[in-house]
Amino acid sequence: MNALIASIRLAVFSLIVCCVAYPLAVWQFARLAAPETAEASLMRGPDGSVVGSSLIGQVFSSPGYFWPRPSAVDYNAAAAAGSNLSPASEKVRERGAKMVDLHGATPANPLPPDLATASGSGLDPDISLEAALFQAPRVATARGLDEAEVRALVADLAVSGPLTPRPRVNVLRVNLALHQLSSVP
């Protein structure tokens, strides 16, 4: 009987340490070391309400916003995955042609590849600097802004690092910054 009671005590103690104390300690350390990431990289709108995460892509379709990469899962984070279609697939070709038409690309002004192809997760929150600058004229026109002002905003928000040497732009972050300049008509 004593062995059973000791086993139960050890199990309860282990559960408290492993399922409560340790996760809380790691979370508190993360909040100190990397507060944005520990809190899910939540982004807030002008009114302070949470509008999304800088780590998960979401759909924008109005001409006054920068558009993200296409998503094979319709930006559903619960179903994050690629399409598993071959690059030679007719569906991939049709989706690419649709994106070229949607963005108004021409041979003289080709569409950056990341605006025509879905990412592996289907939730990529970033686009290349080239993709953002490609969209700047449409966004500036829709918002009644000077294109140079929109391009400067994109350039200011572009980031790169040792793991991602090519500059990229977070779509949610740039769209929130656009609200500081003007609202969508």
Image: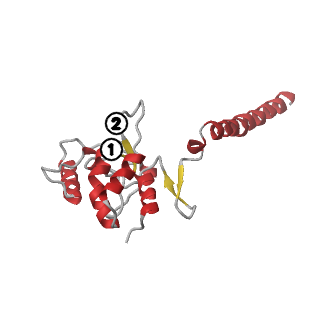
Amino acid marked by disc 2: Arg
Residue underneath mark 2: 166
Report x, y in % for residue 50. Answer: 55, 58
Q: Residues within 10 Å of mark 1 (few under 14, many from 20)?
A: many
Q: Position of residue 122 (x, y in %)?
A: 37, 48
Residue 75 position in % (x across, y down): 39, 54
In the displayed structure image, the side of residue 152 where residue 12 appears, left or right:
right
In the shown orientation, is residue 26 left or right of residue 116? Answer: right
Instruction: Tell me the quarter of the image containing the C terminus.
Output: bottom left
Q: Nearer the viewer, residue 178 or 121?
A: 178
List the residue tagged with mark 1. Answer: 128
Task: Judge by depth and name the residue closer to the eye, 129 or 50.
Answer: 129
Q: Are marks 1 and 2 in contact (CB under 8 Å)?
A: yes
State left or right for residue 35 relative to residue 142: right
Using the image, determine if residue 171 lies above or below residue 5.
below
Residue 141: image quadrant is: bottom left
Say above or below: 84 vs 101. Answer: above
